[in-house]
Image (spheres, rainbow, N blue to C red):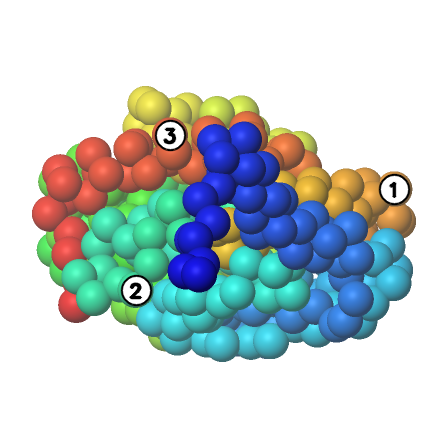
Amino acid sequence: MTAKHWQPTRRATLALCLAASWLAAAPAHAQADNWPAKPIRIVVGFPAGSFTDTIARALSDQLSKQLGQPVIVDNKPGANGAIGVGEVARSAPDGYTLLVTNSSSITINPQIYKKITYQPKDFAPVTMLLDAPFILTANPDWASKHQIRSAQDVIAYAKRNPDKISYGSAGPGNIAHLAFAQWSNRTGVKTTHVPYKSASQAQLAVLSGELDTQFDTWSALPQIAASKLLPLAVTAPQRMKQLPNVPTMAEAGYADFNVTFWAGLFAPAGTPPAIVDKLYEATKSMLQNEHARNVLSKQGDMVMLAPEPFGQRIAKEVADWKQVIQREAIALD
């Protein structure tokens, strides 16, 4: 007697498909329910002591308390943050490798570096942590020597002395670099960009007189208070409460020149939404932590955007910077 091959009925086929679907989804659900079950690593694409690193370390302490697991900061500096960012883009989307980075590395790098290894779509936005304008600062001795007391004086000097003004940033294509290049081009002057590995190194160069000026971060505030840096303008729509006597760039005569930078927390694309939500809720607790607030408030305004609106802001900034990059014809290897 020959054996007949079993032919599944339509109902049986449907049941098998549903079972297979459930089995495929179950590990992700279980993973999210049990997360975190081991230490978490936050990659930072900038050196220890940098703006981004300072924020990441404050966040790691808070997340460790909230999630009950060690949260380790792993610095991977280089290529304006692209080395560390690229590593996270290639990491497993399991919630154990995260990224703290700034706006340059997400909204600008993929548009100007020809050999970049990631795109914004490679990440799941968790939350914005900080939002801040830049401060146009100058070396006081240089400013005094050339009678520079305002942003307009910087441009007037540059027109009289093409390519004589040097300014710094945390690397080629950094948002501070693009902002200064955009300002120079708008006003028809030639300036010299000097890239550094971090904003803090560029700030030290201005302090020492190695550089003349730059768009600096809020870490300049103590140096401004000590009269070691001269503030000329801020790139916000309104004056900073910390510098009430310093005009905005718009007040200085440069309409619509509003540039802010942010720091944010990301996971690799494909990370289960439940894990992203847990991370967001754990990060929000920083608002109630006095130490975390104190650390972050020295770097910028704490803004805990939820994943969806954070993603929407990133998309808008990518489009805005695309116009600037195309207009300024900026491209890097």
* Residue 239 occupies quadrant: top right
Callout 3 secondary element: helix
Residue 234's spot in the image, x, y percent? 48, 38
Callout 1 secondary element: helix
- In the image, 151 versus 196, the foreground residue is 196
For marks 2 and 3, the one nearer the N-term is 2
Q: Residue furthest front?
A: 1
Per the image, the residue denoted by label 1 is: 288
Residue occupying image coordinates x 20% and y 66% = 115
Per the image, the residue denoted by label 2 is: 117
Q: Which mark is residue 316?
A: 3
Residue 126 can be seen in this image: no
For marks 1 and 3, the one nearer the N-term is 1
Residue 36's spot in the image, x, y percent? 77, 61
In-image side of 222 versus 180 (left or right) = right
39 shown above or below 217: below
For marks 2 and 1, the one nearer the N-term is 2
Disc 3 residue type (three-letter) = Lys
| Contact, mark 2 vs mark 1 (Cβ under 8 Å) | no
* Residue 316 occupies quadrant: top left
Residue 184's spot in the image, x, y percent? 21, 44
